[in-house]
Image: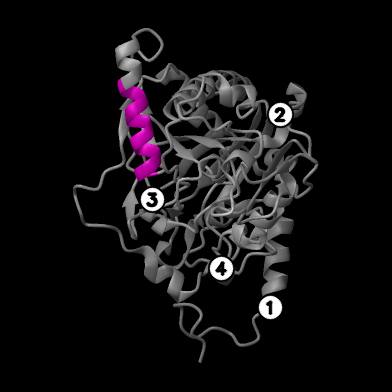
């Protein structure tokens, strides 16, 4: 008897590899299955029972994702100080928050969502031209980046584009969303500069410190299209994970489904019209050596970045949390989201990250070995498949 999933009567001679290859060769993605009228999801999408049992959501009405109003952040010193306090608290307690009055027009946000929908809902033959698993491609459409490595596929299709460094030729981007991607990317980069200023000031650093370290220079834009799912109880939209980034800015439509793990409970990140979701990534958490009980939702990250912080008595040390999050599959759809990942992709690939030298002593020796961002990313992708932290590999 099979116990790995919840659908009874599975064929014992099931050929998973052939199913994966056929799905990938179609280049039509999950939307292609929905367009074909599937009433039951293919077996390759069914997740293990123990993962599905963890879908319960907190019923505590008091648990709500912080919403921070950025109005006046660059014009009123008193308001800016209050906003910095709110950012500090959100990073420490949640690792995720929403922002409003962030400077990006609602019309731009709405057009960005529409642009991604246009791409995914255009003629399949046109869309197929962008379908690839070639990691060297700057612009690509694919369903499940880890299709052939993951134990179960997720119910979504993805379109991605490297924005910085070395952006693609605009003519290589899909005509149906080219202009809005370029405009939205320009504005989200400006917003990221403000966010990194706020985090730097929350840490007691000069406002330009993180920007000078090029935290906002590497930008990878990934959009997800989650079609309506006929059996959402058997699969996931996105598996549980943390982001191997400094900061992620997420635009989502009003369908819902994003959740964050907080105090061992899954909490809905309910869509707010005109808002953007901000979550702190692994590398941003690694910048701060304060460790405490707030790490219960994650493996404690102490892979400190050398040269990132010069520790002085003027610094405000607090725990930055890289929160675990996921997206549920849904009867409703499609759901559209656009994630802007700010990571060290612009830095030299050989640059080493390690413990902050000024914080080391006999009582506080290094706990992790030095590594490059490339190696960290490689292990993160591998460990993500099992839902564990890549940091375990770098323990001394």
Q: CA distance from mark 2 to mark 1?
A: 36 Å
Q: Residue furthest top?
A: 75
- Is residue 89 a member of the stretch shown in magenta? yes
Q: Which badge, 3 or 1, comes first in the chain's sequence? A: 1
The quadrant holding residue 284 is: top right
Mark closer to the observer (2, 4): 2
Please tell me how crowded label 4 is: few (under 14), some (14-19), or many (20+) other residues with Cα within 10 Å: few
Please tell me how crowded label 2 is: few (under 14), some (14-19), or many (20+) other residues with Cα within 10 Å: some
Residue on which the image places disc 2: 173
Residue on which the image places disc 3: 259
Question: Residue at the location (58% across, 85% down)?
Answer: 11
Element at badge 1?
loop
Answer with left or right where residue 383 lies relative to residue 94: right
Q: Which badge, 2 or 1, comes first in the chain's sequence? A: 1
- Is residue 63 a member of the stretch shown in magenta? no
Q: Which badge, 4 or 1, comes first in the chain's sequence? A: 1
């Amino acid at each position: 008897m099979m116990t790995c999933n919840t659908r009874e009567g599975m064929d014992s001679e099931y050929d998973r590899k052939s199913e994966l290859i056929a799905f990938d060769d179609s280049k039509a993605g999950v939307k292609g299955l929905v367009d074909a009228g599937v009433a039951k999801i293919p077996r390759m999408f069914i997740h293990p029972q123990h993962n599905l049992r963890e879908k319960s959501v907190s019923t505590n009405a008091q648990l709500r994702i912080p919403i921070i109003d950025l109005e006046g952040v660059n014009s009123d010193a008193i308001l800016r100080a209050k906003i910095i306090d709110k950012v500090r608290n959100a990073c420490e307690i949640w690792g995720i928050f929403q922002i409003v009055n962030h400077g990006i027009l609602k019309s731009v946000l709405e057009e960005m969502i529409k642009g991604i929908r246009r791409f995914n809902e255009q003629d399949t033959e046109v869309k197929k031209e962008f379908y690839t698993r070639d990691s060297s491609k700057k612009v690509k459409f694919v369903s499940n980046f880890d299709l052939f490595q993951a134990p179960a596929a997720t119910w979504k299709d993805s379109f991605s584009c490297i924005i910085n460094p070395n952006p693609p030729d605009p003519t290589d981007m899909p005509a149906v969303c080219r202009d809005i991607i370029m405009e939205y990317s320009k504005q989200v980069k400006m917003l990221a500069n403000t966010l990194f200023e706020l985090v730097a000031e929350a840490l007691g650093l000069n406002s330009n410190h993180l920007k000078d370290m090029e935290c906002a220079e590497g930008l990878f834009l990934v959009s997800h299209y989650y079609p309506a799912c006929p059996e959402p109880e058997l699969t996931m939209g996105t598996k549980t994970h943390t982001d191997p980034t400094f900061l992620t800015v997420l635009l989502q439509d009003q369908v819902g489904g994003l959740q964050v793990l907080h105090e061992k409970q899954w909490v809905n990140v309910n869509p707010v019209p005109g808002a953007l979701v901000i979550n702190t990534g692994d590398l941003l958490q690694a910048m701060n050596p304060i460790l405490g009980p707030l790490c219960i939702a994650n493996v404690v990250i102490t892979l400190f970045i050398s040269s990132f912080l010069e520790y002085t008595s003027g610094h405000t040390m607090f725990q930055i949390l890289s929160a675990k999050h996921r997206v549920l599959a849904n009867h409703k759809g499609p759901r559209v989201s656009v994630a802007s990942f700010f990571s060290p992709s612009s830095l030299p690939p050989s640059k080493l990250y390690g413990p902050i030298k000024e914080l080391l002593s006999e009582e506080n020796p290094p706990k992790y070995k030095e590594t490059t961002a490339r190696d960290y990313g490689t292990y993160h992708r591998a460990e993500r498949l099992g839902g564990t932290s890549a940091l375990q590999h770098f323990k001394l």
